[in-house]
Amino acid sequence: MEQRFGSRSGPFFGIYQGTIRQAEFRQLCPVSKTRSIRREYEELVTAVLCICQQLWNFEKSVDEFLNQYLDSQNSHPFDAGASGG
């Protein structure tokens, strides 16, 4: 995820940054400190959103699937405040 976050970060990441910082979320989805540093929370939320919205497009490579999803989401304007996050 570190690589994906660095090369594909954009406005879409802002939608769930507040969520992944909440203590309740971290209790529901615990990861180690090392994995947290490697942005596993971002990877987890990205994967869940991607699967919920694009599962029918999945073919073979999870990395490619998530990268395409992030590219697509970052290329469309949206209202980050409307997410409720």
Image (cartoon, rainbow, N blue to C red):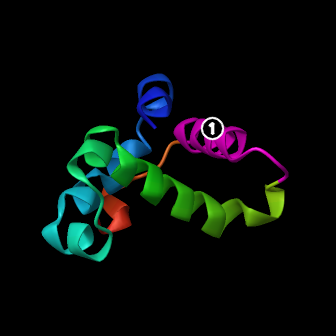
- In the picture as drawn, the residue positioned furthest to the right comes out as 59
Image height of 56 relative to 76, above or below? below
Q: Quadrant of residue 18?
A: bottom left
Residue at image location 36% in from the left, 63% down from the top: 82
Check disc 1 and report its element: helix, strand or loop. helix
Front residue of 41/34: it is 34
Q: Quadrant of residue 45?
A: bottom left
Q: Residue 66: x percent and y percent?
A: 62, 45
Q: Is residue 78 left or right of residue 31?
A: right
Q: Is residue 67 magenta?
A: yes
Front residue of 66/27: it is 27
Front residue of 82/23: it is 23
Residue type at numbered disc 1: Asn
- In the picture as drawn, the residue positioned furthest to the left comes out as 23
Task: Name the magenta segment's main secondary structure.
Answer: helix
Q: Residue 36: x percent and y percent?
A: 27, 47
Per the rendered image, the range of residues in magenta is: 59-76
Residue at image location 55% in from the left, 57% down from the top: 47
Residue at image location 47% in from the left, 27% down from the top: 3
Q: Is residue 17 left or right of residue 44?
A: left
Q: Which residue is mark 1?
A: 67
Q: Is residue 31 left or right of residue 33?
A: right
